[in-house]
Amino acid sequence: MKILIVEDDLDAAAYLTKAFREAGIVSDHASDGDSGLFLAMENAYDVLVVDRMLPRRDGLSLISELRARGIHTPALILSALGQVDDRVTGLRAGGDDYLPKPYAFSELLARVEVLGRRKGLPDQDMTYRVGDLELDRLAHVVRRGGREILLQPREFRLLEYLMKNAGQVVTRTMLLENVWDYHFDPQTNVIDVHVSRLRSKIEKDFDQPLLRTVRGAGYMIKDEVSA
């Protein structure tokens, strides 16, 4: 999942970015309403997390403008204004959810996950399967042959992206942009290291390999037996 955080409080934005990253969610950040509007129009996000009070353009205006332009990415509004009338105004402006400040991150995370599922795109299946390997996106659990495999958050996101594109070659650039959120190649072996670790975890003690390197192209996860 990839989200956009529109928050002018830089400390709060840094906290959210770190907390979402630890939960396996990639995020971009905009510090004012105009920048948030630009990013939301130029990029595909699963969810927008928008502070209501923003410089240059307030959060409700940002969301209203997106809706007017036919962009219906689910939006969660964060605000210190938490009265019923405030929440109703936010929802009528095009918001999909409204969370008053202060809030617990666990609740924010749960609401973001719900909105991500609500997006309803064809690739939003909650469970991916390749052979006897199964990844449950909602429970954040991976199993192979019924046995649970423990993965680190980055490994989980890497496997999730590979399984989402099962049977297709996934390039380094695709992984950098969708798993690491890099829009350039840092010329490191970070991908190779993580793929190697992931491969050892999902293939150890199993006869059938699933994850293979496509020389000069990238990586592919595929059930060769079924194929």
Image (spheres, rainbow, N blue to C red):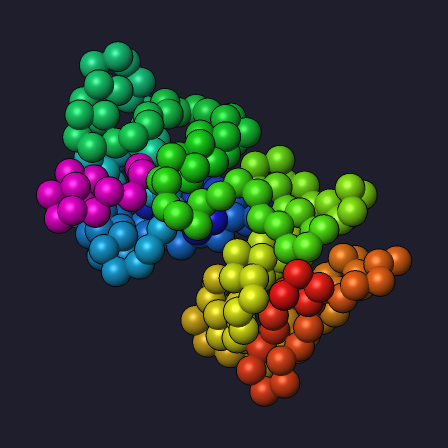
Task: Give the vertical position of 199 relative to 78 (above or below).
Answer: below
Q: Residue furthest left?
A: 68
Q: Residue furthest top?
A: 84
The x and y percentages for residue 144 are 75, 49
Q: Name which residue lies at 33% across and 26% down.
A: 98
Q: Is residue 163 visible?
A: yes
In this view of the protein, can residue 161 be seen by the observer? no
Q: Report the side of 42 relative to 227 (left or right).
A: left
Q: Is residue 62 left or right of residue 120?
A: left
Q: Position of residue 1 (x, y in %)?
A: 47, 49
Q: Is residue 115 left or right of residue 207?
A: left
Magenta residues, as a range?
A: 63-75
- Classify 52 as above or below 101: below
Judge by depth and name the residue closer to the eye, 176 or 35.
Answer: 176
- Residue beneath the point at 61% across and 70% down: 220
Q: Residue lying furthest bottom in this view? A: 216
Quadrant for residue 44, please give it.
bottom left
Residue 85, magenta (yes or no)? no
Residue 37: give x, y in percent of width and height.
22, 51
Q: How many labels were placed on the picture?
A: 0
Q: Residue at x 53, y 40 (%)?
A: 126
The percent coordinates of residue 26 (x first, y second) are 49, 53
Identify whether 187 is placed above or below 145. Answer: below
Look at the image and tell me in which quarter the C terminus lies: bottom right
Residue 83, image quadrant: top left
Quadrant of the image occupied by residue 61: top left
| Residue 65 highlighted magenta (yes or no) | yes
- In this rendered view, identify the residue nearer to me: 84 or 197: 197
